[in-house]
Image (tube, rainbow, N blue to C red):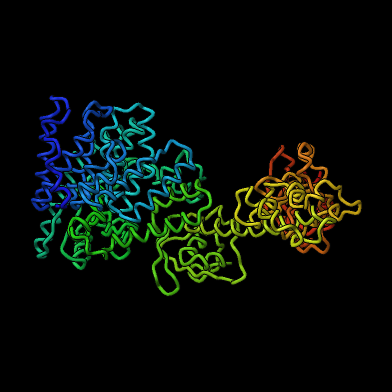
């Protein structure tokens, strides 16, 4: 017990003097006594008294405040603390749970909590109080910023999120008093965020209840239908499970194996996910991130209720890992296993540290029944996860637990990802996807196991190894065979990444990578690459605007540069150049303000070099792009438009969008192609052909003869005799494109050909 508490405890009001309605006082006394009796099973007597003092402190602080259900607010923190006490959490965590809303909802401060119960408890309460600001129905940017705070708090002390999970669980248990719209919103955020976090922490007892409550409030009709289906099935299936338990138990005794044989019912949400194909909720609907192809493929693997094998399962708990495998062999000798349904999570644990052997057997009558085999230690870890650290080591000295290590590794990965993420929305979506890892396990050439989420590609594998490996990868070998970088990986494959030091990330990778680290690393690199390119372009535009007045940026008055940088709330001149390059500021206006006063009003010289067009080389990078509406290529007459945030967008001068942009004349700049351009550009053709066998092959062969690459081909059947094809080609210039078109016009299949845009 802390010394400050001993000095001040007598100042607390006796429970009978608290301003709480008389009808609740007896109930409150009983709840406090019941809670203290529970914690007395594993805490010291002095600590139990401190828990009672915290109950009184919280009751006094929340006096006169009621929940929407009509009960006194103090019942909520008591229930939260009891949830954690059932898992045998440490003394300080329980105190913080009792006081977790005091700072947020009452006049008491962190300093008051620290004076009464110690700094450690105050820090925990303060950490939980900051998390109460998360509102998932707010704007995505604000939502993501609050997520950042949550993960930072988790990284500092995992007990913060434990209290938050218990708080959410009790809120879900009492959600019936909320309006329908609020129930659905809270249920969705529980299924998207809180339940997966509980799963990542290995706290399955919390996760399963959160998931079932979330499903019940989000889809009440579906929940009731499944609940009734389980009830109807229970009689016959439970009898079969009982027969299996008895037979297995008898054989275990014959073999002299000490074990516990238990039956297990799968929770409703687990059944629902199996039937839906286990597609994570954020990908099912209302997500800003499009689902990956592999996600959609998984979504199609839906099942009928009768095809879910593990509604009821048999669980065998033994004393050692060796015994697990002995029991597995014995079970396979008693009942035939279903091929392809065996999983060894002991050799390769799940991301949250879960370990067990899973197999599906043909039970009595040919009914498929799942069998799980694990040790006592694995069973505890499967139920309470990282909470086992405090349950069995209350002094908190052992920081080497496997579950703790895995969780901290996951948190380090998330914190690294959020540091790299430039867009809060991307961070939010990446976190949601990262919480649904449905793992695959692949091997490095040295035999090391790498865990990846379902649908992960060779690029995800490369970034998992190291960010530098991902940034420089150019190819991959899977089981010694070259494969495209976008190839999804499967469990058991050996993956080797091919790197080139001069290679750079391709923005197209963002269309297929699934890991948060890969997405954040690619965006981080591209963001910094764009900034460097924007600075160079901004410098070119500013020098062009200053041409004829000064010979270079070095001749500008330094005091004017510093003053202008300060005026725009920037820290460096490079940031101002980047703003110009990205089209956020007009170079001509900036140039005018940077000139000495005597030259600001003077007209530019008649031979002003600023009239010279800006040369386009095609290698400027992300700050110079080409309009997809007209797809200009070298040789076309072009014009440039400064598009805010994107830099220069180059259009053909007769593009239909040019007319609409003429209203912003100050953003149009004269551009022309540089000499001897070596890059390739996209051009689109519209081709009408006769619908006959082999026509597509003839078209592709003709294009190939002109040394031209085909990016995409889209076809539209107009009627039974003709087809319209849209060809996106890579060409070096207008003359190259003309050669392709001349070749296509010579084909007998060609009816009409035109360049689009």
Instruction: Locate residue 446 relative to residue 98 in the image: left or right.
Output: right
Which picture quadrant has residue 358?
Answer: bottom left
Q: Image height check: is 709 above or below 142?
A: below
Q: Image height check: is 505 above or below 151?
A: below
Question: Residue 605, can we see it?
Answer: yes
Residue at figure coordinates x 85%, y 48% from the top left:
602
Which picture quadrant has residue 321?
Answer: bottom left
In the rendering, at what x and y percent does residue 681 appear? 74, 56
In the rendering, at what x and y percent does residue 534 appear? 67, 56
The residue nearer to you, when weighing 381 against 325, is 381
Q: Image height check: is 458 above or below 657?
A: below
Instruction: Locate residue 376 relative to residue 189 in the image: left or right.
Output: left
In the rendering, at what x and y percent does residue 128 appear? 31, 45
The single residue placed furthest to the bottom in the displayed view is 446
The residue nearer to you, when weighing 710 against 330, is 710
Residue at figure coordinates x 13%, y 56% from the top left:
260
In the rendering, at what x and y percent does residue 638 appear? 81, 49
The single residue placed furthest to the right in the displayed view is 606
Location of the C terminus (image quadrant): top right
How many numbered circles does the render carry? Answer: 0
Question: Residue 748, can we see it?
Answer: no
């Amino acid at each position: 017990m802390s010394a400050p508490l001993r000095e001040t405890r007598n100042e607390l009001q006796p429970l009978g003097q608290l301003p709480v309605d008389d009808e609740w006082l007896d109930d409150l006394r009983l709840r406090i006594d019941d809670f203290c009796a529970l914690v007395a099973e594993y805490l010291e007597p002095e600590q139990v008294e401190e828990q009672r003092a915290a109950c009184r402190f919280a009751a006094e602080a929340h006096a006169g405040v009621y929940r929407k259900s009509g009960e006194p607010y103090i019942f909520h923190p008591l229930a939260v603390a009891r949830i954690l006490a059932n898992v045998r959490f440490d003394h300080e965590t329980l105190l913080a749970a009792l006081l977790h809303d005091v700072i947020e909802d009452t006049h008491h401060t962190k300093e008051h909590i620290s004076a009464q119960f110690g700094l450690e408890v105050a820090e925990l309460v303060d950490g939980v109080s900051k998390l109460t600001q998360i509102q998932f129905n707010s704007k995505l940017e604000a939502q993501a910023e609050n997520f950042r705070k949550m993960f930072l708090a988790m990284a500092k002390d995992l007990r913060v999120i434990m209290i938050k999970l218990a708080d959410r669980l009790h809120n879900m248990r009492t959600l019936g008093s909320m309006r329908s719209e609020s129930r659905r919103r809270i249920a969705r955020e529980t299924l998207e965020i809180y339940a997966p976090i509980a799963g990542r922490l290995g706290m399955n007892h919390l996760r399963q209840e959160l998931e079932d409550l979330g499903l019940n409030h989000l889809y009440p009709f579906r929940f009731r239908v499944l609940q009734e289906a389980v009830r109807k099935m229970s009689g016959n299936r439970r009898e079969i499970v009982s027969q299996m338990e008895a037979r297995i138990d008898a054989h275990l005794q014959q073999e002299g194996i000490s074990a516990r044989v238990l039956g297990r019912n799968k929770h409703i949400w687990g059944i629902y996910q199996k039937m839906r194909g286990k597609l994570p909720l954020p990908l099912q609907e209302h997500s800003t991130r499009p689902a990956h192809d592999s996600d959609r493929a998984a979504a199609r693997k839906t099942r009928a209720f009768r095809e879910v094998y593990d509604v009821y399962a048999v669980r065998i708990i033994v004393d050692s890992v060796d015994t697990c495998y002995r029991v597995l062999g014995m079970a396979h000798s008693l009942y035939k296993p279903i091929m392809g349904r065996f999983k060894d999570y002991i050799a390769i644990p799940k991301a949250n540290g879960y370990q067990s052997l899973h197999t599906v057997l043909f039970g009595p009558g040919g009914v498929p029944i799942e069998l799980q085999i694990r040790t006592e230690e694995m069973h505890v870890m499967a139920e309470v996860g990282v909470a086992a650290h405090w349950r069995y080591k209350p002094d908190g000295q052992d920081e080497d637990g496997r579950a703790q290590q895995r969780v901290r590794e996951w948190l380090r990965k998330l914190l690294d990802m959020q540091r790299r993420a430039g867009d809060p929305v991307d961070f939010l979506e990446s976190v949601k996807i990262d919480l649904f890892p449905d793992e695959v396990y692949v091997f490095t050439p040295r035999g090391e196991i790498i865990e990846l989420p379902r649908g992960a590609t060779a690029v995800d594998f490369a970034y998992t190894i190291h960010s530098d490996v991902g940034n420089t990868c150019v190819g991959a070998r899977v089981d010694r065979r070259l494969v495209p970088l976008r190839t999804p990986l499967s469990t058991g494959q050996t993956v080797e990444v091919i790197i080139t030091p001069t290679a750079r990330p391709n923005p197209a990778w963002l269309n297929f990578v699934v890991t948060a680290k890969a997405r954040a690393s690619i965006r981080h690199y591209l963001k910094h690459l764009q900034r460097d390119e924007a600075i160079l372009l901004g410098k070119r535009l500013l020098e062009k605007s200053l041409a004829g007045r000064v010979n270079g940026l070095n001749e500008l008055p330094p005091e004017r540069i510093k003053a202008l940088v300060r005026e725009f709330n920037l820290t460096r001149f490079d940031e101002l150049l980047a703003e110009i390059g990205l089209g956020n500021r007009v170079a001509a206006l900036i140039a005018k303000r940077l000139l000495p006063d005597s030259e600001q009003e003077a007209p530019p010289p008649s031979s002003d070099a600023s009239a010279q067009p800006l040369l386009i080389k095609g290698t400027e990078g992300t700050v110079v792009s080409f309009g997809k509406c007209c797809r200009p290529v070298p040789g076309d007459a072009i014009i440039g438009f400064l598009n805010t945030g994107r830099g220069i967008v180059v259009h053909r001068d007769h593009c239909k969008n040019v007319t609409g942009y003429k209203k912003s004349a100050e953003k149009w700049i004269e551009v022309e192609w540089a000499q001897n351009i070596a890059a390739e550009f996209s051009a689109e053709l519209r081709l009408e052909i006769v619908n006959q066998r082999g026509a597509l092959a003839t078209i592709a062969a003709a294009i190939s003869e002109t040394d031209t690459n085909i990016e995409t081909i889209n076809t539209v059947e107009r009627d039974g005799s003709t087809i319209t094809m849209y060809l996106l080609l890579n060409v070096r210039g207008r003359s190259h494109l003309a050669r392709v078109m001349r070749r296509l016009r010579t084909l007998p299949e060609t009816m009409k050909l035109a360049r689009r845009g």
